[in-house]
Amino acid sequence: MATQLSWLGHGCWEIATEGGRIVLDPFLDDNPLAAKKADQVEADYILISHGHYDHMADAEKIARRTGATIISCYEICEYFRGRGLEKLQPMNIGGVSQQPFGRVKMTPAWHSSTLPDGSPGGAAAGFLLFLPEGNVYFACDTGLMQEMAWIGRAGLALAVLPIGDLFTMGPDDALEAVRLLHPRKVVPVHLNTWPLIQQDAQAWRDRVQQQTQTEVILLEPGQSIRL
Ligand code: NI
Ligand code: MN
């Protein structure tokens, strides 16, 4: 089975691999543009980049229904342990976890992370997945950072970058991020969910494709790509 990555809207992805089904940053039921409801998602693993509502609102209900393991930073795993969940894989920035679908590395992110109850969520993160068909970098919520240069050294089949601005990188810095990462393909996310993060994805695609070697893939929520 070839790995298939489906964007469900905002920062949320469903990734079907030979070694299991992954959901990243589940935010579905309260997302006006989401392609699915939380009860329509099947998962063996739930990756959570940070504690903000628009990245983990549906994590607990998906974990309870499916029995999926939550993979996140130590503080977020402890938050879910306190709520009675037991299948947890805590990690932290720079660490790698070997999973049946491949290795997961937790990468830094310039962002904040506060949990729904107001407690600190540890460091905000991104994820680098080493999948059989290639490496995929999810920047998740972050500003532009020089660390992207060494993340790119892994060799990236795909990078997923926020371009919505205001809470994350906007289009200009995301173009600079493509220069640092030099992925084969890039998908822009974290845009148009609300008027505050409205962006012209087609204009961004044109700029990136004129100024870099990277192919820009524009997805609608619910659409998929293969590596
Ligand atoms: Ni955030
Ligand atoms: Mn966000």
Image: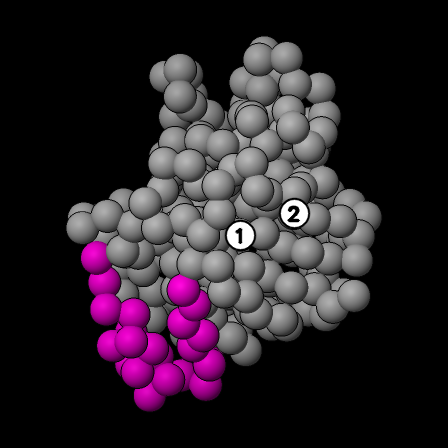
**Which part of the image, by quadrant, shows the N terminus?**
bottom right
Q: How many marks?
A: 2
Q: Which residue is mark 1?
A: 13
Q: Residue at x 71, y 29 (%)?
A: 67
**Residue shown at the point (78%, 45%) measured from the top left:** 99
**Going from the N terminus, do you reach mark 2 or mark 1 first?**
1
Residue 129 at x, y percent in the picture:
65, 56
Percent coordinates x, y for residue 35 in the rendering: 45, 52
Vertical placement of residue 125 versus 63, above or below: below
Indicate which disc residue 124 carries: none
Instruction: Identify which residue is drawn at 42% across, 36% down.
Output: 29
Residue 197 in percent (x, y) is at 23, 52
The amino acid on which the numbered mark 1 sits, given as a three-letter code, is: Trp
Given the image, on which type of amino acid does mark 2 rest?
Ile
Local secondary structure at mark 2: strand
On the image, which quarter does residue 102 sit in?
A: bottom right
Q: Nearer the viewer, residue 102 or 34?
A: 34
In what quadrant of the picture does the C terminus appear?
A: bottom right
Please give left or right for residue 201 compared with residue 6 in the image: left
Position in image of residue 94 (x %, y %): 61, 44
Q: Residue 219 in magenta?
A: yes
Does residue 125 appear to the left or right of 20 in the view shown?
A: left
How crowded pointer 2 is (Cα within 10 Å; few <14, some 14-19, many 20+) is rated as many
- Give the image quarter of residue 167: top left
Query: Circles 2 and 1: CB distance less than 8 Å?
Result: yes
- Give, as a single range, the part of the protein colored magenta: 198-220
- Disc 2: which residue: 22
